[in-house]
Image (spheres, rainbow, N blue to C red):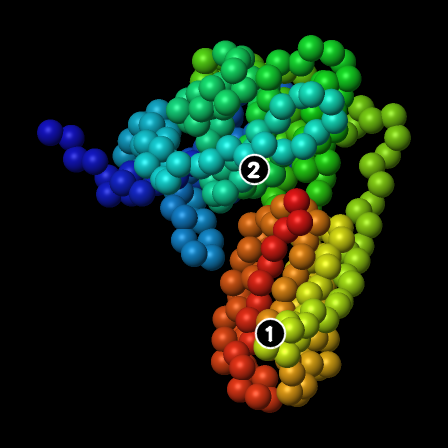
Amino acid sequence: MKTVPVELLTVMPLLKGRHYAIQPGVAHRDLDAQPQSPRIFYGHDHPQTFSFAPDDLGVSLDELHAAALANLGRRPVSVWVRIPIAGDLAVVASCDDFFAAERLLLPAQLRSAHMILATRELVAAIPHRGLLLATRPFRTTEERAAFSALVQQRFASGVDEPIASHLFRVVDGQLDGRDGVADPTRATTPVAAPAPARLVQRAVGDPATGLVSVVVGVCGGTADQLQRAIPDAVDTVLRSWLHQPTFSGRIQFELDAPIGLAVQRLETELRGDLARMTTSSGRPIRLELTTTE
């Protein structure tokens, strides 16, 4: 009986954009046979890193791929959420998992989108790490333009590692080629640089307790900008409020966009840093990140 390498028990697929430099000896394959195809890598997920699998595990690439998809399918179900877009084009997103984009490879995940959108064909996109978008086939050029613009905006947003701006056709849960290309090089006008994040701080009192919390509204900003702006804002709040006897210790950030994985990791790190801090009145410092979307 053939012994299954222990590495196959936990191996996962990881999609990377065509720009990613391939290291020698790393197992990988193209997602499709089209130009500028994203690549599928394989490896093992760790809390702070992803270790790539070598191409000499003693199994074929097809066996490695099958094991990775089986392990991906055992993860908790990713929930589709509807996102707003112009007109009546329904768009759903899977964005609650580091491996959300890789769920493009899972027929079961795609079939659930078929059911939600009531169509046997889908147009899907994987603009960046942790995001899978899907919609029904386009009925007008305006619908195609609106979805392509959404994909390109997310691809260039800096929220997380970009993967691809292509649009993929899905039939009955299976990838079935491309459905056009959301290509930034075809734009008639250059894509503007992202505006800096704008933070507005306000104090919110609780009549029942007489205590004051600090709420910071965050408008715009890329993931890189937010990873600098949010810690700076926390420092500013603490300098102003830490020794105020009425400060509740609660600092809430209200973001006007979905919270990406990079910002989620930042929230975890900041909570760890603040865990041992208290106000001058002995109240613990509590950090919350929420979204107004």
Q: Position of residue 232 (x, y in %)?
A: 71, 70
Q: Check disc 1 and report its element: helix, strand or loop.
A: loop
Which amino acid is tagged 2? Leu
Is the residue 168 above or below the residue 255 in the image?
Answer: above
Q: Residues within 10 Å of mark 2 (few under 14, many from 20)?
A: many
Q: Is residue 181 visible?
A: no
The image quadrant that residue 64 belongs to is: top left
Q: Residues within 10 Å of mark 1 (few under 14, many from 20)?
A: few
Residue that badge 2 annotates: 131
Q: Is residue 85 left or right of residue 271?
A: right
Q: Is residue 114 left or right of residue 53?
A: right
The residue nearer to you, when weighing 79 against 110, is 79
Q: Residue at 46%, 31% (x, y): give it.
A: 103
The image quadrant that residue 215 belongs to is: bottom right
Q: CA distance from mark 1 to mark 2?
A: 41 Å
Residue that badge 1 annotates: 208
Which amino acid is tagged 1? Ala
Q: Nearer the viewer, mark 1 or mark 2?
A: 1
The residue lying furthest to the front in this view is: 208
Q: Residue at 60%, 38% (x, y): give it.
A: 128
Q: Position of residue 127 (x, y in %)?
A: 62, 34
Q: Position of residue 159 (x, y in %)?
A: 65, 47
Q: Residue at 70%, 29% (x, y): give it.
A: 85
Q: Position of residue 143 (x, y in %)?
A: 72, 18
The residue nearer to you, when weighing 288 against 97, is 288
Quadrant (top left, top right, bottom left, bottom right) of the C terminus: top right
Is the residue 118 above or below the residue 28 in the image?
Answer: above
Q: Residue at 55%, 34% (x, y): give it.
A: 81
